[in-house]
Amino acid sequence: MLTHLHIKHFKAWKDTGPIRLAPLTVIFGANSAGKSSLGHLLLALQQTARSTDRKRALHLGDTASLIDLGTFADCLHGHDLTQSLDFEIGWDLPKALDVRDPLQPNARYQGDRMQLAVSLAAGKAAQPEVQKLRYALGAGSSDVLDVQLRRDDKRKFTLSSEHYGFKMADGRKWPLEEPEKFYRLSDISIARFKNAGFLSDFALATEAMLDSISYLGPLRNHPQRIYQWSGDTPSSVGQMGENAIAAILAAQSEGRMLNRGPKRAKQEFAPFIAAWLKDLGVIHDFSVRPVAQGRKEYEVLIKTHAKAPDVKITDVGFGVSQVLPALVQAFYCPPNSTVWMEQPEIHLHPQVQAELADVFISATQAREDSKERNVQLIVESHSEHFLNRLQRRVAEGAIQPQDVAVYFCRRAGAATELEPLRLNMFGEIENWPEHFFGNEMDDIAGRTLAAMQRKREMAIKSDPK
């Protein structure tokens, strides 16, 4: 689970400031304010980690990648190539990492959280190069081990630590190589030292963290009359929800059992999703069935109310097909995952938007096979109804204030600012921003004045004297 994020000089962001990421994090803001670019950087880091090109510090994308951010200049704030792109990301480790120094058997470093800070600057052909990277392994509120790789004025790298004594291998002191991607020392560089093998574990922890992130965009595929599934297990529902039905079938075939929290009844995956759709009020029943025995073609059947016949998902309101991928991904993703969603409430009635907050609260608390899933949701939204329900559930104690983080994204000249909203135990936002959801009082006052003016005009026309 991600714990914090800090970005400098990326697109609209000159400096985001430290962003605390809770199990349920919600980001509001005006259109084109820069909300989406926060998630876009994480996608760029993920596709870099998955790339086969180890020499590329940051894979900015192409037509076949998760995201295409253009050139490095396009990514930098103000397109200023003299600036560096800096980011820091922190996360909790699913399992504590234990580092031992082979040269000092009694030296042991154990931590359950990791932090990676990277600075990238334009190099040859204006491509990003690593200027420095720093790892920190922590336990509680303290760092137990830190490692820093830094490029000096002569473009050579040095490796240092405040907590650990690196010892060069015997023989000629060869210079360190360029790091692989933005986070990994090469095997040759690690071999320059007698006791740097644990750095491979740090890189693997980074790859595992990035691989645990999934993304659902604001535009989802139209529903289909027939879906194909040949037994594969997709890693996610896909950026446009294109794999949502395959994910349901895969989870069902694996016998996955979920419940909404402690002491709640377990359900198979497909009935579990169907129950949430019913609770949202968008359907009465939902099922995925093969069109015939032994076939790999499936149809999604919906019953809108108790006495209604089953109809295909293409023959009901558009909102069902749009919310379905959000529900599936929230519960389909593996334990210890982070799901980034953009506008999951799109095409939904205001009441359903409010109910969606209950779904996401449950997703952060759900259990699978009697074990906590520890899933994190980061949601970009424009829905006041979603926020109102979230505040209500905090006041009722259904979710603790520390398990929620709410931010407001606003333009400030050429840059963007991110304001954390203070949500107290009563569900109240103590620093409500101006024009958060537009100026409702302006509309009320304007409507009242317009009505008074119209009434005066009508009175004059009816009685000119």
Image (cartoon, grey):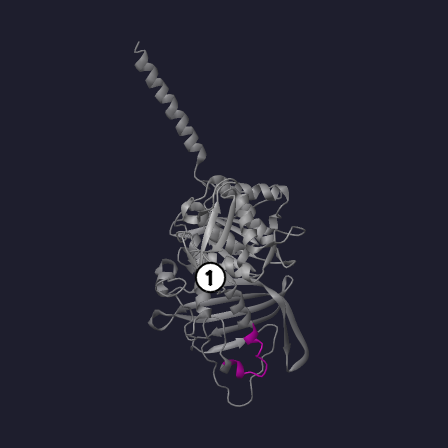
Say if 152 sits above or below 400 in the image: below
Q: Residue furthest top?
A: 465
User: Mark 1 Cα within 10 Å, few/some/many (few <14, many 20+)?
Assistant: some
Quadrant in the rendering for residue 446? top left
Image point (56%, 84%), residue name: 168
Residue matched to label 1: 42
The residue that appears at 43% across and 74% down in the rendered structure is 52
Q: Nearer the viewer, residue 438 or 47?
A: 47
- The residue range painted magenta reads 189-201
Instruction: Name the residue furthest front.
Output: 293
Picture coordinates of residue 88, whole percent (x, y): 51, 63
The amino acid type found where label 1 is placed reads Leu
Which residue is rendered at x = 45% and y = 43% of the image?
A: 348
Instruction: Say if residue 429 shows up in the picture.
Output: no
User: Does residue 214 appear in this view?
Assistant: yes
Q: Nearer the viewer, residue 403 or 345?
A: 345
Residue 35: image location, x then y, percent = 44, 52
The N terminus lies in quadrant: bottom right
Figure check: 158 above or below 262: below
Which secondary structure, mark 1? helix
Residue 197 in magenta stretch: yes
Q: Is residue 6 one of those drawn in magenta?
A: no
Image quarter (top left, top right, bottom left or bottom right) of the C terminus: top left
| Residue positioned most to the bottom | 171
Relative image position of residue 375 (x, y in whole percent): 57, 57
Q: Position of residue 453 (x, y in %)?
A: 36, 22
Q: Along the line of sight, which residue is nearer the eye, 8 or 207?
A: 207
Q: How many marks?
A: 1
